[in-house]
Image (spheres, coloured by chain):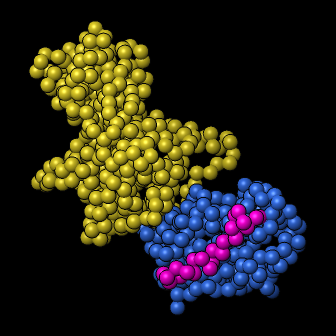
Chain colours: A blue, B yellow
């Protein structure tokens, strides 16, 4: 019997810097599997964000650029405009994309830039130590909302997939999760579709992935999955919000 | 090629194309929007790329991404826009990408005004963004010189893998003058395959490239900064450009002035010469690297009594002039910074009054 489970070639051999129970590793793997299956690693450029995934390039084996906080979509625009033949994706968290980078993502989506964004939403700033993000749930405790997020003064959590879906420009906008095995295959399918739309030159593609951050949520990995399922999924509904077809 | 009459901003756009730069990202701002307007028509004609970004912040990162994958790129903006781009400029310098920035300065601080100014000298030469980095800064005094400087700026940016800034002002951008475009200049052999994220297939390798500015290890970050410093030191050795004026005379006053202001100073110097009052000038053409030795040497002349930095700012370059004169002579400042350019008469009055003070 041959090997039934192998490491994608687009992934490198590295010890992970991500915390136990963090879902970045799963999402990295899905991206790498898709890049392998499409056989595009030789013409792929990834754009790393600021946040936990700033070191994402340590885990991939193809070209990478490192952005500043929130600006990855502008960098991807720059790459794609001068090299439309390259496959380009940004990999961003929710502090990066939904807060400081709100302008860049909205305008890139509205221009219909032909790149893919993987948006990892775990409702909290990870790298800086668990501060409140625009995606933090009402009442959720973080290091800058120690009494729980107060909606009166900070508003409701931003739903990026829905927000981007209001743009008239054609795009592929979906929200997935990887918190349980049953969701993972679907998430991969969505990521593959997103890359395929890009390669066909069809549209901007955006895959939001609801994720866990046990460390900054103050929960065990198992509790974190439970909390995400009970609290996040009812608010951040999974599904395709927009397709270009 | 025959001379053509062109507005500075349009000539700058055309010069970039002739230097082989076919990628331009920008955001409109007075007094340089004509660069974008010109290129929005011209780029499609030459098969180039024009994109108006949503903000100067975004534009600086479009430039970063495009440059990081090996393309020749540039932008143009004016003072408040350059402030917004400064975040990106710091990252571009840290990640060692060659990008050309045109800054057609206007008055500040804040919204300031839209008339010519040289108040961004500090920002251009001392940083602007965070961290230890330098731009190679060139300061044209005519539309012709702007064209020539734009054309060499791309190969200089690539030679050093460093951003280059062309620091003009509203007058250079708005004025029409006859220009002659030099033939395409030979550029340095490219080493882009060694660092650019152009796709491994493009380079025919399975070795990936990584463009970044993060070095969490203190030793590595220090090494990286030493490497950057070595580049800036090399610029000081190889790229200093300046024009001496009336330097052979037995001048009593040495003026240091650049860009638009230096043209007024030339007229003032010529007029004073007719009266028998000798004044010399060093006109820096590169502001970083600054012509340190030239200023020091010119200030050492026995007949010279005072050095005056004349600039359209409240006294910025004067600090570099003081640094170069090293206390040998008094160093003074004269200038205006509201948008009015000092007249030759005003320059003459100031030169004479400083001279009287020090004889």
Q: Between A146 and B303, which is closer to the camera in this rendering? A: A146
Q: Is residue B142 above or below residue A75?
A: above
Q: Is residue B69 above or below residue B282?
A: below
Q: Which residues are magenta?
A: A149-171
Q: Which quadrant of the figure has residue B219?
A: top right
Q: Work out whether residue B327 can be spotted.
A: yes
Q: Between B153 and B126, which is closer to the camera in this rendering? A: B126
Residue that protrudes farthest toward the bottom in the picture: A245
**What residue appears at the point 63 percent right and 67 percent down from the top-left corner?**
A98
Left or right of B125? Residue A61 is right
Query: Residue B127's x, y, as percent?
Result: 49, 41
Query: Residue B357's x, y, as percent?
Result: 30, 12
Q: Work out whether residue A114 can be spotted.
A: no
Query: Residue B107's x, y, as percent?
Result: 36, 43
Looking at the figure, which quarter contains the C terminus of chain B? top left
Q: Between B29 and B213, which is closer to the camera in this rendering? A: B29
């Amino acid at each position: 019997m041959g090997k039934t489970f192998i490491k994608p070639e687009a992934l490198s051999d590295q010890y992970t810097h991500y915390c136990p129970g963090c879902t970045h590793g799963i999402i990295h793997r899905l991206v790498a599997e898709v890049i392998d299956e499409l056989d595009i690693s030789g013409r792929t450029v990834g754009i790393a964000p600021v946040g936990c995934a700033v070191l994402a390039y340590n885990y991939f084996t193809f070209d990478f650029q490192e952005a500043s906080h929130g600006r990855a979509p502008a960098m991807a625009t720059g790459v794609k405009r001068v090299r439309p033949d390259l496959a380009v994706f940004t990999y961003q968290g929710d502090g990066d994309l939904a807060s400081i980078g709100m302008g860049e993502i909205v305008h890139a989506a509205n221009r219909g830039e032909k790149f893919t964004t993987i948006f990892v939403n775990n409702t909290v700033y990870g790298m800086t130590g668990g501060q409140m993000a625009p995606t933090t749930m009402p009442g959720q405790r973080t290091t800058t909302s120690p009494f729980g997020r107060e909606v009166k003064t900070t508003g409701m959590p931003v739903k990026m997939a829905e927000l981007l879906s209001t743009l008239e420009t054609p795009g592929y906008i979906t929200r997935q999760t990887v918190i349980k095995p049953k969701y993972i295959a679907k998430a991969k399918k969505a990521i593959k579709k997103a890359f395929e739309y890009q390669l066909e030159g069809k549209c901007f593609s955006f895959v939001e992935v609801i994720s866990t951050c046990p460390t900054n949520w103050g929960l065990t990995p198992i509790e974190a999955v439970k909390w995400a399922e009970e609290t996040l999924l009812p608010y951040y509904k999974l599904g395709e919000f927009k397709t270009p077809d | 090629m025959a001379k053509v009459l062109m507005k500075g901003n349009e000539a700058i756009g055309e010069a970039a194309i002739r230097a082989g730069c076919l990628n331009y990202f920008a955001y409109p701002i007075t007094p340089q929007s004509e660069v974008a307007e010109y290129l929005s028509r011209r780029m499609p004609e030459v098969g180039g790329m024009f994109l108006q970004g949503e903000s100067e912040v975004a534009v600086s990162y479009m430039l970063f991404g495009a440059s990081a994958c090996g393309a020749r790129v540039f932008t143009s903006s004016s003072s408040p826009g350059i402030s917004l781009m400064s975040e990106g400029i710091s990252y571009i310098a840290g990640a060692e990408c060659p990008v050309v920035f045109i800054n057609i300065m206007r008055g500040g601080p804040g919204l300031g005004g839209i008339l010519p100014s040289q108040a961004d000298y500090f920002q251009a030469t001392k940083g602007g963004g965070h961290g230890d980095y330098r731009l190679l800064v060139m300061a044209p005094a005519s539309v012709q010189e702007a064209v020539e400087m734009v054309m060499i700026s791309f190969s200089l940016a690539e030679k050093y893998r460093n951003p280059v800034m062309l620091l003009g002002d509203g007058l250079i951008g708005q004025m029409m003058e006859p220009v002659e475009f030099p033939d395409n200049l030979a550029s340095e052999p490219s080493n882009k395959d060694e660092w650019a994220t152009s796709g491994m297939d493009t380079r025919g390798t399975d070795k990936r490239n990584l463009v970044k500015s993060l070095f969490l290890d203190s030793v590595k970050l220090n090494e990286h900064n030493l490497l950057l410093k070595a580049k800036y030191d090399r610029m000081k050795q190889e790229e200093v450009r300046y024009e001496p004026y009336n330097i052979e005379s037995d001048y009593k006053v040495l003026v240091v002035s650049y860009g638009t202001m230096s043209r007024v100073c030339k007229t003032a110097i010529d007029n004073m010469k007719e009266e028998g009052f000798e004044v010399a000038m060093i006109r820096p053409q590169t502001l970083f690297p600054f012509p340190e030795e030239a200023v020091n040497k010119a200030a050492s002349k026995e007949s010279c009594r005072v050095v005056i930095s004349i600039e359209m700012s409240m006294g910025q370059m004067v600090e570099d002039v003081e640094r170069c004169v090293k206390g040998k002579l008094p160093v003074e400042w004269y200038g205006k910074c509201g948008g009015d350019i000092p007249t030759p008469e005003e320059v003459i009055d100031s030169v004479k009054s400083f001279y009287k003070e020090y004889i």
